[in-house]
Image: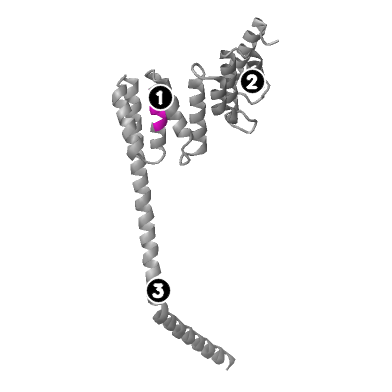
């Protein structure tokens, strides 16, 4: 008798659950179907967007590599046009890379002032990642060593010479070179010693700094 009662109760419970499911479906069925459709469309959209991004990035990368090939083949005018076009309608990071390479190309063609201005413009562009802006600032500083005052070089590089900066080694080097260029051997020695005293300085930069220190010491001008 007990087993029959249990069986009856289970059947009643199952029927109640079935009624509840039907009621829920009548009330929310369209919403559930709509949500499922949106989920499918969203998935399709993401896949399509990822494919589009990958395709666009690949095309921009091919154009950038094509410009670099032109430079190697000494077709610099054609390369400059391709880089300029890529700056305007490129995808992802390639417009910025095109700006950087275009600025370097100006320097290679003897237009140092134009290259400095181009790198300074990149450094001031808030839409560009900070690491690239700092790189552009440093490139401008290196190009300014021969033709600008120490103060102008320092305005670009000194903020990158702090202990927390990843670019401090190169920034210290360019500051040391500028100071040496302008006959301020004491200041140059201080910057080069900061490089040799930093255990994290790259070997090539540390070697160049030591060479400059030896040169300054031999001259006896920084005593």
Measure the alpha-carbon separation of dots 3 and 2. 69 Å
Single out the mark in the foreground, 1 or 2.
1
112 over 217 or under it: above or below? below
Disc sitting over residue 31 in the figure: 3
For the residue labelled by badge 3, is the local secondary structure a helix, a strand or a loop? helix
* Residue at 56%, 28% in the rendered image: 155
**Which residue position is annotated with label 1?**
114
Q: Please give the count of numbered marks on the rendered protein.
A: 3
Residue 39, above or below 51? below
Q: Is residue 100 magenta?
A: yes
The chief SS type of the magenta part is helix
Q: Where in the figure is residue 70, as x and y percent of width and height?
A: 31, 24
- Judging by the rendered image, the residue that carries numbered circle 2 is 191
Q: Nearer the viewer, residue 84 or 2?
A: 84
**In the rendered structure, does residue 137 fall within the stretch colored magenta?**
no
The crowding category of the residue bearing disc 1, from other C-alpha atoms within 10 Å (few below 14, some 14 to 19, many at least 20), is some
Whole-angstrom CA distance, mark 3 to mark 1, is: 61 Å
Query: Residue 154, located in which quarter of the rendered image?
Result: top right
Magenta stretch bounds: 99-105
């Amino acid at each position: 008798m007990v087993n029959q009662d249990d069986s009856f109760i289970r059947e009643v419970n199952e029927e109640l659950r079935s009624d509840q499911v039907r009621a829920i479906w009548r009330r929310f069925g369209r919403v559930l179907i709509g949500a499922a459709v949106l989920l499918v469309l969203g998935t399709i959209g993401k896949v399509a967007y990822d494919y589009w991004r990958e395709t666009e990035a690949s095309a921009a990368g091919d154009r950038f590599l094509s410009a670099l090939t032109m430079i190697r083949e000494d077709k610099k005018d054609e390369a400059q046009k391709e880089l300029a076009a890529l700056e305007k309608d490129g995808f992802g990071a390639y417009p910025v890379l095109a700006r950087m390479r275009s600025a370097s190309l100006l320097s290679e063609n003897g237009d140092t002032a134009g290259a400095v201005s181009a790198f300074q413009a990149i450094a001031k562009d808030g839409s560009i990642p900070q690491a690239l802006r700092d790189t552009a600032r440093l490139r401008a500083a290196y190009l300014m060593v021969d033709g600008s005052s120490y103060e102008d070089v320092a305005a670009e590089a000194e903020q990158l010479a702090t202990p927390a900066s990843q670019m401090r080694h190169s920034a210290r080097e360019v500051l040391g070179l500028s100071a040496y260029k302008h006959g301020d051997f004491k200041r140059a020695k201080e910057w080069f010693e900061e490089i040799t005293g930093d255990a994290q300085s790259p070997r090539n930069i540390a070697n160049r700094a030591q060479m400059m220190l030896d040169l300054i010491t031999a001259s006896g001008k920084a005593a």
